[in-house]
Image: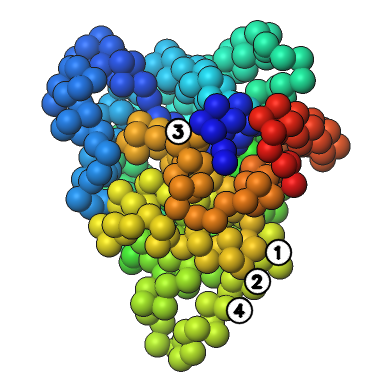
Amino acid sequence: MFSNEFIREIPKTDLHVHLDGSLRLATLIDLAKEQNVSLPSYTPEGLMDTVFKKAYKDLPEYLQGFAYTCAVMQDPDSLERVSYEFALDNAAEGVYYVEVRFAPQLHVNDQMDIETVISSVNRGLERAKKEINKNKKDADMPDFEYGIIVCNLRMFMGESSPYYKKIMDALSWSPRKEIFAQASLQLARAAIDIRDRKGYPIVGFDLAGAEHGYPAIDHMEAFHYAHRNFMKKTVHAGEAYGAESIFQAITALHADRIGHGYLLFSKEALTNPEITDKEAYLKKLSEYIADRRITIEVCLTSNRQTNPGLVDISKHSLRDMLKHNLSVTLCTDNRLVSQTTVSDEIELAIKNFEISSSTLRNIIVYGFKRSFFPGSYVQKRNYVRGVIDYYEKICKKHGIASK
């Protein structure tokens, strides 16, 4: 019903994509050679065989690649190049709006503070945006736009980065959970100050990292600070821990969107002994999410790669999300690490779930409507209206019902 050409031509978003997981392989190799960073291989084929695979045995193996990508993103020029190419790669497949997320703390060193890191990324994205919009082949195409989401980490070690080592050393007498919470609060203060002072499109505040044993509520002060300063929030939740994690993200951290939400309907993943009627709890939670249009950033390929039990992608909870009319958008998570694109994710969903033309339209439009668009409300409305008009134009071209 939906051809590959149609999928590539329709306007798309990616609201959940990590910059350090989305480099070009050739760029990773080039930067590693320039910076004398050791890689298991210096050919694309070799890296795809040893590091960036189509399938991983578990989450730890999936995460190994980030050690190499982060290692080559430790100076302003490298960050700008990676960001510039990232934007071009998205635009090439019809992704007109992207919210790229990363943890600036992992790139802070003697050369760069948090502001320099964000400035370097923004410079690359802005340069690409100007080129993309200048060279549009069709005047009706939406402009390419972007937002930046900064990531807190639920936990970290001193070896994670020089920035984190300084924090761990300075607060060495504090309990670990307090250190993690203070690091998050510092990032919230930095992001909002830089946004307001420099005007960069820092549109969102995120919490990522290991869910199990590191509850979102520990970072509540940082998210409340972001909330008071009109910063939108998204939280990785329900990826490796149950629905309680999603509930906590929404209620304690004021999350506007949920990253992954894979375990939203899993009774087996509920561990709180106070929840005696698991089915009722999950039903109420999904109704709460639906009623408030809290959008779930679904990453099919990534979930299959990090959850060994998900052999059949058609068993993914996206099926129940669609059944309950939840607001969902399809995302890549990591273009390189997961070896995927937004077009690939849409094709995967179409092949494994009942995606009608109206359902596909909803998924696409939700991506734009529930974005943390950096402009004003009126600007966002006008932008989304233009996107919908262009979507309908592509549908008409391919003889597909747009509603």
| Number of the front mark, 1 or 3 | 3
Q: Which amino acid does label 1 sit on?
A: Arg
Q: Tell me the tag on residue 288.
A: 2
Identify the amino acid type marked 2: Tyr
- Which disc number belongs to residue 284? 4
Picture residue at 71% right of the left edge, 64% below the top: 292
**Which secondary structure lies at badge 4?**
helix
| Left or right for 114, reference 68 | right
- Do callouts 1 and 2 mark residues in contact (Cβ within 8 Å)? yes
Front residue of 73 and 54: 54
Q: What is the crowding at mark 2: few (fewer than 14 residues within 10 Å), some, or many (at least 20)?
A: some
C-alpha separation, residue under disc 2 versus residue under disc 3: 31 Å
Of 347 and 107, nearer the camera is 347
Q: State which tag comes first along the sequence, 2 or 3.
A: 2
Q: Sequence-wise, which precedes: disc 4 or disc 3?
A: 4
Work out whether mark 1 precedes mark 3 in sequence or the reverse, and give the earlier one: 1
Q: Which residue lies furthest to the left in this view?
A: 40
Q: Which mark is residue 341?
A: 3
The answer to whether residue 222 is visible is no
